[in-house]
Every structure is written in structure tokens, then in C-alpha cells.
Amino acid sequence: MAKKDMEKIEGLGIVETKYYNMPDGEEFLLESGLKISTLKIAYETYGELNDDKTNAVLICHSLSGDAHVAGYHQGDKKPGWWDDMIGPGKAFDTDKYFVVCSNVIGGCKGSSGPNSIAPETGKPYGLGFPIVSIKDMVEAQRKLLSFFGIEKLLSVCGGSMGGMQALQWAVSYPDEVLSCIPIATTYKHSAQQIAFDEVGRQAIMTDPTWQGGDYYEKEQPSAGLAVARMIGHITYMSNESMEDKFGRALKKEELGYEFTTEFEVEGYLRYRGDSFVKRFDANSYLYITKAMDYFDLQQDKKLHQAFKGIKTRFLVIAFSSDWLYPPSQSKDLVKAFKMNGIDVTYCEISSDYGHDAFLLEFNEETKLVKHFIEKTYKRVKK
Amino acid sequence: MAKKDMEKIEGLGIVETKYYNMPDGEEFLLESGLKISTLKIAYETYGELNDDKTNAVLICHSLSGDAHVAGYHQGDKKPGWWDDMIGPGKAFDTDKYFVVCSNVIGGCKGSSGPNSIAPETGKPYGLGFPIVSIKDMVEAQRKLLSFFGIEKLLSVCGGSMGGMQALQWAVSYPDEVLSCIPIATTYKHSAQQIAFDEVGRQAIMTDPTWQGGDYYEKEQPSAGLAVARMIGHITYMSNESMEDKFGRALKKEELGYEFTTEFEVEGYLRYRGDSFVKRFDANSYLYITKAMDYFDLQQDKKLHQAFKGIKTRFLVIAFSSDWLYPPSQSKDLVKAFKMNGIDVTYCEISSDYGHDAFLLEFNEETKLVKHFIEKTYKRVKK
């Protein structure tokens, strides 16, 4: 590799999260009919917005993600959650595109959410924060883009819940989205997907420290949130990847005949649960899972009717071993697009990583995404 | 249908649970090396043991089952948990066979378990009860059978954890088991199966009312146990059956934008969780899931080596949509049997009911089981 290329893929270096505040006096109307009077959006941007503002790409994050998708925060050893995909020369090439990622509303990483201060009380909202939907998350992102003067997105992309937002963008604003890349996602939450979320919520809400969501001055319901996260982790991994990674390996030399952590897989889950509670707010877990459960582009229609009149180009990516958002749901989506004559490319990447694959199979994703966006961008510049 | 047949399938009528107590002074040795000094086994029997004691069939129950597998308890509106399969003229024909079912040790339905009184303290064992294994459950059943003077089983059958016991019987006592019917089960718990159990245990053990297992004089950790059961229920149903039964149906007319039970599937799970805590002991949930997690007939060997020298005939049944104990695990088992020249019949029943199918697809199971046992019994009588 030439030295110039080496430098190119070295990444974005130090980046920082910024904040957009909706102007005083304005109110942010939600799908429920309720309003937020002081909307704040945490975001990061990489690359330069071109003069005609045609090179903007929006990345949408999943349940536990945030605005920090790439580059390093000062002092951090780990980069953003999708750094492999975003930067100079990467799939989302910041030498060419202006990449935006913002924390969803209802979240806990800087955007308005249940841990924000309610102006009425001067205390954290808790459950006083209104329920938000995927559509509301998209509306908040649109506010931010309009602050940049961006009227059209070259592309919107996301995995898991990020894919739901990407799809919602194309449905809500078909004329403002040139291309859309939903990855490892679905067009509506199924009964099983709702069920897993509900059990996680129950684990949180039955933790006595949850206190109806009013725990910010004390401690957060760590035990409940850890259990919720552990359930989540099982659904993110495939049976195969768990078997490969852990099998029945023991932490000690032999069975202990006790209820401590004996199997490697138990230790891993407890570790993931415990580390999650240090960086995530339990109420946000409730709000975000609820938003996903509400997500239903199909409603009572036939699925293809949901995508009437859309001109957006699509690249739909699914992973063979993803049983949380299985390829069958992506295929339904692709079929519905085709029935509308929509330009769609579908790729099922063969992977043992389960749902987590969208964060791990970046080599395969890069091949697909890079070419797809370049092709879209060429059309814009014509 | 002729009147005689009608009477025949009317079932067992009123039955009752009985109790076997190990003679004073004897001790029951466990796989861990620990002992139980006052072993008690709750059991039910149906039909008559023949003079040469060659018509005994042992039914083994799953996680939440008990000794009451068929017939009605006085005053009950519902029969035992597998009444469709056991009774005059049914798959396990009580006109021909002597059917025995006992509650596993570690359980909470009458056999020795964490809620039993420890003779040393006069109080419930709690976590003072020693950890038990599937092998220990089988040893306890063997004690009971020996009390009846039964030296050979015509058949041993069970679904889910019951299937593990059935397999363990054939491995531990190949000369005492003429036929074995493992249904919807596995030869070892996989990392994913351990993971689901561990999250359930964490939900219980992090419930503050659990109190290290010492809650019997207060209240049991209902919230944690309910969450554990909800997780279980998701794994017992298939994606398809959840979608068919609930889809995205709402309990009310429209979305409420609140954290109450909104979707039918949420209401169902909460109901199943809440009703379970009324009939099951949280500590037993810990002990029994741990026994399943320890279950590993393969150990460090090749699987077929685990079944060397077995002469038992097998009927292995799996269900197409069972993702908790998927057909692939049953197929591995069948392959290992065949490598040992063991007489085995395999049937994958096509069903949308997921793991629960072993309790629901009794028509299909009856066809397979009835013929299989009759054939085995004919050989005995020759």
C-alpha cells in the first residue's frame, strides 16, 4: 500500500460531540401529540459539506449507540462505534461526503431524553418525558439537518434500530432521500421482537430501585438494566457464534456445584450487563425499546402499499445468522420495493456473528456501501 | 366410535400424588459428592404392574412439570400436564402398562428440594440444598422403581428436560432400559441454552426479596421469577406461533403512548409470568436450570462414544420450529446412535408451536409412541 493510502485510512483522528438546541419559543411536536419545549440534539459531523449541500450522509444508530460513530474523543482509547466504516477512504468516505450522526431523542447520550432536565420542574424528566417514536427520532434529525441547510440527503444508513430510522426517512420524506441503506433491520417489530423488549422492560421496572423512573438523585436500577442487556446480548449473537466463542467452557478447572459464574458464557453475559449499566440510562432503555416496538411501516395495509411513490434507491443488507432481524424480513422489504418499481439491491452476507454482524462484517459492508454511494453521488453531480 | 372405545378414552379419572421416603439411616449420594439424608419422592402411578414387572413405563417431566402427569386431582378442573398421552387406550395405554411419573429432586412439587425442611435446622434448606444433576434425578427415580421391585423399564420417555433424563437413563443403565423416547431435547446444553438459563437465574438472584435464597418465611422473589419465566416462554414459542397468536394486536383500540401493557403479546407474557410465581418456587428454578446446564453426555469425547454398548431401542422426536432444542441436536443424537448400531427411529414433526409442541402435538406423538411401545412390549412377552 502506498504511503498516501496508508495515511488515508488512518481515520478521523480527534473528534467531538456538539449540541444543537432548538431556538427558544419553538416546540417540538411528537407523534403522540405531546410536545418537547427544549429540544437538544447531540451530534457529530465528519468531512466537509459541499457548497450545493449535496454530499450529506446521515448515519442512524441502534439501541445502545450514540452520536459518536467515528474518530476518537480526546483521551479515549476506543474510536466511535462504526469507525471502520467512516473516515477518509472508507465506505463513508469523509474526503467526499459530509457525514452526520446524532443521538436519538429519548436517548441518554446528550439528546433530549428522560434524563434531561424538565424546564417545568428543574429536575430530570424521568417518566415525565413523553414517549417517542422512530418517526419522532427522524423529525429531530431533520431539524438538525435543516440547521445545516441540508434539504436533501445523499444517503441515510443505519443498522438495527438505525435501519428503522433510515426506512422511516424514505417513507416520511421520499423526496429528501436519494439513497437509503437499511442493514439488519425490519419494517415492523414482530410479536417475538416486542416480547424480548417487554421482558427487558419488566426486568427494569420490577427492580425496586427503579422507583417509577424517579431514581436520578439516588442510584439507577442497575440489576434490572443488566438483566435487560443480558437478554439483548443473547439475541444479538447467533447460536453458532456463542458455541464457537464459549461452548461449554468453564471459568475454573472443574464444575463447582454452586450458583456462581461457572461457564464462560455466564461470565461474558454478566460482564456485558454490568458494563452496560455504567454507560446507559435505564429509562432510556425503556423509551428506545418502546419506540422500536411501535415501529410498523406496514400498519393495516399490504406491505408494498407503504412504499408507494418512493424514488429513493435502496441497498438492503441482511446477515445469514441474524435471528433477531432475520433475512426473511429484509426479503419481504425488497419484494415490496420491487412491486413499486423501486431501484433496490439486496445482499445477504453470510456470517456467523448473528445480529452483531452489522457492527463486525465491515469488510463486506464496505464493498457494498462504497460502490452504492459513489454511484448515487455520480448521479447527483450530473 | 363404539361405546366401549368412548369409555376407553375417557381417561384415568381421579388420581393422587403419593410419597416415597427413603428408609431412615440411608443416605442419598449425589454426583457432587454431597448427600441428602432424608430423600422424599412425590410420584403418581397409573395402570397395574404385571406379575413379572415387565410393563413399567417411566415418564420424566420438564422444568416446570411435576409428578401429576395424567388424570384429575380431586376437585381440579384441569388434568395432569400430559393427560392426552396417558390413560386407557392412549399412547401410554394404562390398560397395558404401569406408568410412573415422579417429581424431580431439586423441584418444589413434593420431592426433596430447596423448599424442603432440612433435618439439621428444622427450616427450609434454601441454598443449603445441594446442587443436583440430571444424573441425580435419574438415581432418585431408580430408588423409587426399586421400591416397586422394578428392575427393568419397558420404556422411559420425556420431553425437554424430561428427554435429558430419559437419555441419561439409557446411558447410566443401558441394561435396565428396553426403550427410550427422548422428545424435543438435547444431549448437552449449548452456550445459548446456558445463556438463557443464566439470565433467568440472574433475574431471580438480583431480586432483593430473594435474600440469598432465604425467603421462605417472608415472600418469594416474584418479580425476578416472573421475568425468568417470561424469558422462558419466549424460547418455548416459535416466531411463527407468536406471530399467528398475537402479531402486533393491541389490548386497547389504539396506541396509548405509555409503559403499560399495550400489545397482546406483552399481556400474555406478564400473565404467564405472574401465574407461574403462584405455583413454583424460585429456588427450584435455580436448581433445575442449573441441572440442565450441567447436562452433557458428550463431555470431551466424540458424541458416538457416549453411547457405546447401549442395546436400548430409541424413538427420537423433534419439532421443526423448536429453536430452543432444535432438530439439529436430535439429528446429531440419531447419527451417534446409528454409529453404534443402535436401533433408532427419528421423526421430525412439522409444527409451528416451537418447543411447546411436545405438549401440544399429541396426535402425532400418539401415532409414533403407541406403535413403538407396543412393538417393544411384544418382544418382551416373547
Image (spheres, coloured by chain):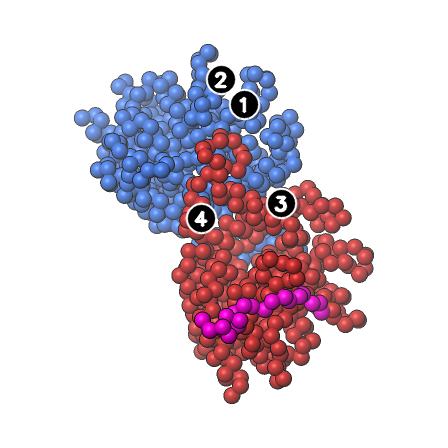
Chain colours: A blue, B red
| Residue B19: x %, y % from top left | 71, 67
At x 71%, y 54%, the residue is B127
- A26 or B374: which is nearer to us? B374
| Residue A100: x %, y % from top left | 38, 26
Task: Determine the residue located farthest toward the front in the rendered image.
Answer: B3
The residue tagged 3 is B224
- Indicate whether A229 appears above or below B126: above
The residue tagged 4 is B245
| Residue A174: x %, y % from top left | 29, 28
Range drawn in magenta: B1-20
The residue tagged 1 is A116
Mark 1 or 4, which is nearer the eye? 4
**For the residue carrying disc 4, how many other residues have a C-alpha within 10 Å: few (<14), some (14-19), or many (20+)?**
few
Question: Which chain hosts label 4?
Answer: B
At x 27%, y 26%, the residue is A175
Q: Which amino acid does label 3 sit on?
A: Gly
Mark 2 or 4, which is nearer the eye? 4
- Indicate whether A276 appears above or below B48: above
Task: Determine the residue located farthest toward the left in the rendered image.
Answer: A382
Q: Are marks 2 and 1 in contact (CB under 8 Å)?
A: yes
| Residue B124: x %, y % from top left | 76, 55
